[in-house]
Amino acid sequence: MIRPTLETERLRLRPFTTADADEVTRLADNEELSRYIPAIPYPYPKYAAAEWISTHQEKFDFGQEIVFAITDKTTRNIIGAIGLVLTPEHKRAEMGYWIGREYWGQRYATEAGQAVIRYAFKTLGLESVIAHHLAPNIASGRVMQKLGMKYEGCRRRFFLHRGEFFDAALYSIIKEEFQG
Ligand SMILES: CC(C)(COP(=O)(O)OP(=O)(O)OC[C@H]1O[C@@H](n2cnc3c(N)ncnc32)[C@H](O)[C@@H]1OP(=O)(O)O)[C@@H](O)C(=O)NCCC(=O)NCCS
């Protein structure tokens, strides 16, 4: 199945291809980027990006996960990644994202998140989208708030990351709350 591409004012969210692996490696291999994101080890292993990208088509075809490269519409540079892990039986998805360190603070995560939540509700017909962030990751919590997500509570010692347990904040948005 053909994976979707979404457009926003500044961004094109498109499928990753194997040609993106080197740039993903460069962006992901960053201590600050991976500090609060358990899915990204640091240092980032050399072949991890290619392996990760190689799983995307199958996960999409099986309705398990949709991953988008966040790219600049004009320069075509890769800025980050955003995705939905699907739980179809409950019409729910969990959203995750990262933005390359050099692109932080330009509202890219918020812009990409809006497009992905719209896609989740309008195209996939989901009922809810949830997201977690490690408790100290204030910037990610701010993104969730700006996306209109509601804080549901704290999941205690929910993630083990770099040998340390972190509480996780859980946010969600349900379809009636989505505006736009
Ligand atoms: C979290 C992350 C995605 C944010 O990306 P971004 O494109 O910079 O986000 P935005 O610019 O859309 O919004 C960030 C918001 O957080 C705020 N912020 C940033 N650092 C902050 C801090 N230390 N304390 C309080 N607010 C902070 C910004 O001011 C902005 O809010 P504002 O628009 O109201 O001013 C990015 O920092 C990142 O990729 N981090 C590493 C990976 C990660 O943590 N992913 C999320 C896992 S849950």
Image: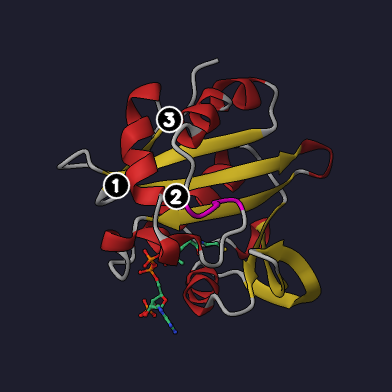
Nearer to me, 58 or 54: 54
Residue highlighted by disc 3: 15
Q: Distance between the residues labelled 2 and 3?
A: 14 Å
Which of the two discs, 1 and 3, sits closer to the camera? 3
Is the shortest distance between ligand 1 and the CB of mark 2 under 8 Å? no
Horizontal side of 58 relative to 113 (left or right) equals: right
Q: Position of residue 134 (x, y in %)?
A: 63, 71
Residue highlighted by disc 1: 11
- Say which amino acid is labelled 2: Ala
- Say which amino acid is labelled 3: Pro
Nearer to me, 92 or 156: 156
Horizontal side of 4 relative to 158 (left or right) equals: left
Q: How far apart are marks 2 and 1 (CA)?
A: 10 Å
Above-or-below relation of 105 to 63: below
Which of the two discs, 2 and 3, sits closer to the camera? 3
Mark drawn on residue 115: 2
Mark drawn on residue 22: none
Label 1 crowd bin: few (<14), some (14–19), many (20+), radius 10 Å: many
For the question of whether residue 7 can be seen, the reply is no
Specify whether residue 34 is painted magenta: no
Ligand 1 is found in the corner quadrant, namely: bottom left
**Which quadrant of the figure has residue 70?**
top left
Q: How far apart are marks 1 and 3 (CA)?
A: 13 Å
Horizontal side of 81 relative to 168 (left or right) equals: left
- Say which amino acid is labelled 1: Leu
Q: What stretch is highlighted in magenta?
A: 39-43
Asked if the residue at tag 1 contacts the one at tag 2, i.e. Cβ–Cβ closer than 8 Å, the answer is yes
